[in-house]
Image (cartoon, rainbow, N blue to C red):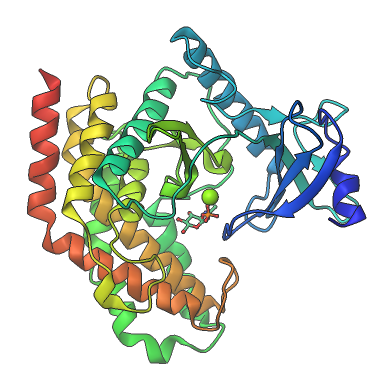
Amino acid sequence: MTDNLKGIALKFSIEGEIADIKPLGEGFINDTFIVTTVGEEAPNYLFQRKNKNIFKDVPSMMGNILKVTTHLKKKVAAKGGDIMREAMTITPTKTGDLYFKDEEGEFWAMCLFIKDNLTYEAADSPELAYAGGKGIGKFQSMLSDMKEPLVDILPGFHNIRFRFKQWDEVLIKDPAGRKAELTEEIAWVEDRRKEMLEFWTLVEDGTIPTRVTHNDTKINNILFDKEGNDLCVIDLDTVLNSTVLNDYGDSMRSYTNTGLEDDDNLDRVSMDMDIFKAYTKGYLEETVSFLTAFEMEYLAFSARYITFEQVLRFLMDYIDGDNYYKIKAPQHNLIRTHAQYKLLTSMEEQYEQMKQVVSKYSKELSV
Ligand code: GN1
Ligand code: MG
């Protein structure tokens, strides 16, 4: 633990005395640490330097998180749950701010570390996928009556029209001179442009409603308890007003993959239908009461949509010269592109069955 890190952590209203500060996890965007305190009484804390290149308005981001967690805690309390374990808790600074800005202009934030939980990097069983579906479903359901609007801190985040605009600009500039060797990969994106934009029109014209959503529902953004039930949805940096389809779709991209997001062995990558079924069942059990018919109709498509978007984003970052995602090797974004594309084609092959699964559960659970 450096003195500087400790000095910044001490700006926050921490209970107890700091024992240690260590890096935690491998987020692609922020730098995350765990602050442990002396003794069992005081809690530990999750401490983050927010990536200011990506999050250009950290104060509004933290404001959004406060609105969402306040609403969630009311809901958890109303059903007799544990508000400290089933919803995130922001730890403010000693002066009552939701973040601290250091001398270098870096933004820091802290929240309580929820103990005795399990996290996963992959959905290794249908039971876990079912619990994950319930977790995201409950999260959306609890927020479905939240009227207060959130600040749009990431304009166009899961908006494919915006992503294509960025894409077109990057392709014209070709800043890293990589375009010429990527004819095949670029065609993967272009071949699907029309279909993806057509879907997004339904969100733009309001056919598919906008609600409070999480927007980064990878499996490692949910805590499970020791019995394997969903406990708490974490990493609320991207809470936004968007479509619930993006959350469901991003979970499917993450949970159903039989390989890694950046697998270099494409034989390992495919979409696992049993995981798809289990997550969908858990998710719809919690959401069928408020989702519209249009939302349910497009659930299966949303898995393809978000996986496609991820192909585009990884490839675009590679063409751009790797400015967005942290990379571990020079070709990392290209490897990620190939792995996500393999997953996308596996979803395309199984699309009819995916639609049948969604339709079966939405009918069964609606009665
Ligand atoms: C980023 O930081 P992390 O790993 O939670 C990204 C997501 C991507 C994801 C790909 C703000 O999330 O949108 O889907 O990587 N977050 C942001 O794994 O861009
Ligand atoms: Mg995360």
Q: Identify whether 296 is placed above or below 271.
A: above
- Give percent across and percent down for residue 106: 80, 52
User: At 27% from the left edge and 54% from the top edge, which residue is drawn?
Assistant: 256
Task: State left or right for residue 200 relative to residue 174.
Answer: left
- Regarding residue 132, the answer to whether it shows in the image is yes
Q: Tell me which corner region of the image, top left, top right, bottom left or bottom right, holds residue 292.
A: top left
Q: Residue furthest front?
A: 39
Q: Quadrant of the C terminus?
A: top left
From the viewer's side, name the closer residue of 68 and 73.
73
Q: Quadrant of the N terminus?
A: bottom right
- Give percent across and percent down for residue 165: 44, 63
Task: State left or right for residue 203 relative to residue 215.
Answer: left
User: At 28% from the left edge and 62% from the top edge, which residue is drawn?
Assistant: 258
Q: Identify whether 146 is placed above or below 238.
A: above
Task: State left or right for residue 356 relative to residue 96.
Answer: left
- Give percent across and percent down for residue 9: 83, 42
- Give percent across and percent down for residue 118: 48, 42
User: At 18% from the left edge and 43% from the top edge, which residue is drawn?
Assistant: 277
Counting the numbered discs, the total is 0
- Regarding residue 197, the answer to whether it shows in the image is no
